[in-house]
Image: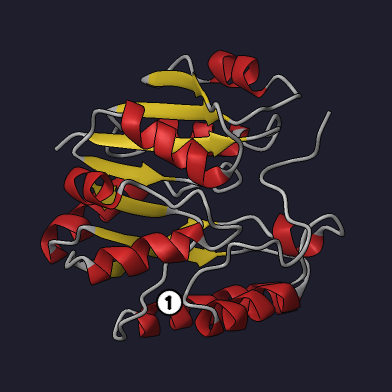
Amino acid sequence: MKLSVIIPCKNEVGVVDALLTSLEVQTRTIDELIVVDSHSTDGTAKHVRKLGKQLPLKIVKAIKKGVAEARNIGGRESTGDVLLFLDADARLENDFIERFLYEYTKRKLAVGGFTQRMPSSRKGIEVGAHFMNGYARLMQHTPWPIAFSCLFADRSAFDELSGFDPELFIMEDYDFVYRAKKAGFRTGIIQVPYIASDRRYSSPDQPPIWRGIYAELYRYTHGMRITKPLFDYQMGGKKK
């Protein structure tokens, strides 16, 4: 089984470093790493190339903007049987890949996500992340499964679904899993947590938690699709 890891990046110098380091020390090595540079202005591609010398690294440039486009070009450029999409601000315990592939194979999954741990100086953020784990697991038993941030897909599912929908403003990750289940693929949440960053919720430049709740309600009342900009939201880090 060949595993391709895909990391969309936009202005992630100093952020993606921890993820790359954690990929180097996995108990099960990865077969291919594709970093997709999505219009960075801080030298992300050069930075990653320097840091990733010990990894099976390939850097590609996204033509169009947005995380869905970046994931899609990474998926199309990859050669793996299993695709693992990781956010640049995540990091992994050193047995994450091994445990993930074991559960993926044992449960015969095609598409899904993971639970998360989100260390934060703000207790409410940690509690919210814990709540989202339960919510994601619960939704697997409904016609509307979700997964967020870090996802996986087998090659056949990614190709049949044509990847992530670039027309969506946000929640393209939710949509990908939802469409997978509708298409008959086996979906699920693997309880092997990745370590998530709290920057989306602790920074004044990113949407607070209540906006996520609003977007969730909007999605369920507008055909499961959010195509209009409900609020200011940008992929990745700050411009340089």
The front one of 184 and 37 is 184
Which amino acid, by three-letter code, is at mark 1? Ala
Taking 131 as reference, is 184 left or right? left
x and y, in percent, of residue 43 in the image: 70, 19
Q: Is residue 150 above or below residue 82?
A: below
The quadrant in which the N terminus is found is top left
Q: How is the image coloured?
A: secondary structure
Q: Is residue 192 something that shows in the picture?
A: no
The front one of 151 and 164 is 164
Report which quarter residue 200 is drawn in.
Answer: bottom right
x and y, in percent, of residue 162 in the image: 31, 46
Taking 185 as reference, is 230 left or right? right
Q: Is residue 93 above or below residue 62?
A: below
x and y, in percent, of residue 198 in the image: 69, 60
State how many labels appear. 1
Q: Is residue 61 something that shows in the picture?
A: yes
* Residue located 59% across and 60% down the image: 170
* Residue located 55% across and 26% down the image: 63
The quadrant in which the C terminus is found is top right
* Residue located 41% across and 45% down the image: 85
Taking 216 as reference, is 186 left or right? left
Q: In this view, does 185 lie above or below 164?
A: below
> Within 10 angstroms of label 1, few (less than 14), some, or many (20 or more) residues?
many
x and y, in percent, of residue 127 in the image: 63, 80
Per the image, label 1 sits on a secondary structure element best described as: helix
Report which quarter residue 222 is drawn in.
Answer: bottom right
The residue that label 1 is drawn on is 136
* Residue located 27% across and 54% down the image: 99
